[in-house]
Image (cartoon, helix red, strand yellow):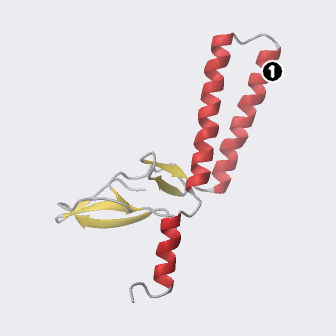
Amino acid sequence: MAENKETKGFIQVYKSTNTVPCEPWFAPADAEIAYPFVKEAPDPKLKSPKYDWNNYRWYETDGAVQGQQLAEIAKQVNQLKDDVANGKVSDEALNQQLGTLVGLVSQGAIEQQASQPSKDDKADSAAKSDGGDK
């Protein structure tokens, strides 16, 4: 994604919801930016970014990329098992590595949960499909 841009009194912002994971928009420079818009541009390394409104950060939603990340975590876990079995890791190092791996797995679980439609998004979809206010 591109860096935030300012054009004649407007700034680039990004819309991110369950139905629209990442869409660039322009807003007046003096506007208050709030959900579902965010000023922070997603990392250009992300293939399919989506904003995590609970943790205020962008994350990857592409299944193939997530699969690669899980494969890397599995590889690290297996290496850690081997190191522990061979006595190559101290208790302190083991705890540190386990903490890192738990953090990575937790992050993956949060991302998976965040990719599920929320009640608000379902309500928005229902309102749009039945014509909204009557």
Query: Split into 4 quadrants, where in the image is the N terminus?
Result: bottom left
- SS of the residue under disc 1: helix
Image point (74%, 33%), residue name = 75
Answer above or below: position of 87 versus 48. Answer: above
Amino acid type, callout 1: Asp
Q: Is residue 20 visible?
A: no
Answer above or below: position of 101 versus 29. Answer: above
Image coordinates for residue 111, horizontal then vertical, percent: 57, 50
Image coordinates for residue 62, horizontal then vertical, percent: 61, 56
Image coordinates for residue 58, horizontal then vertical, percent: 46, 50
- Using the image as rendered, state which of residue 17 and residue 41 is in the foreground: 17
Is disc 1 surrounded by few (<14), some (14 to 19) or many (20+) residues within 10 Å?
Answer: few
Q: Is residue 127 left or right of residue 104?
A: left
Image coordinates for residue 63, horizontal then vertical, percent: 66, 55
Please name the residue that numbered disc 1 is placed on.
82
- Using the image as rendered, state which of residue 15 and residue 116 is in the foreground: 116
Q: Is residue 114 left or right of residue 51?
A: right
Image point (69%, 36%), residue name = 73
Q: Quadrant of residue 87?
A: top right
Answer above or below: position of 67 versus 126. Answer: above
- Using the image as rendered, state which of residue 18 and residue 39 is in the foreground: 18
Q: Is residue 85 left or right of residue 26?
A: right
Image point (53%, 71%), residue name = 122
Q: Is residue 34 visible?
A: yes
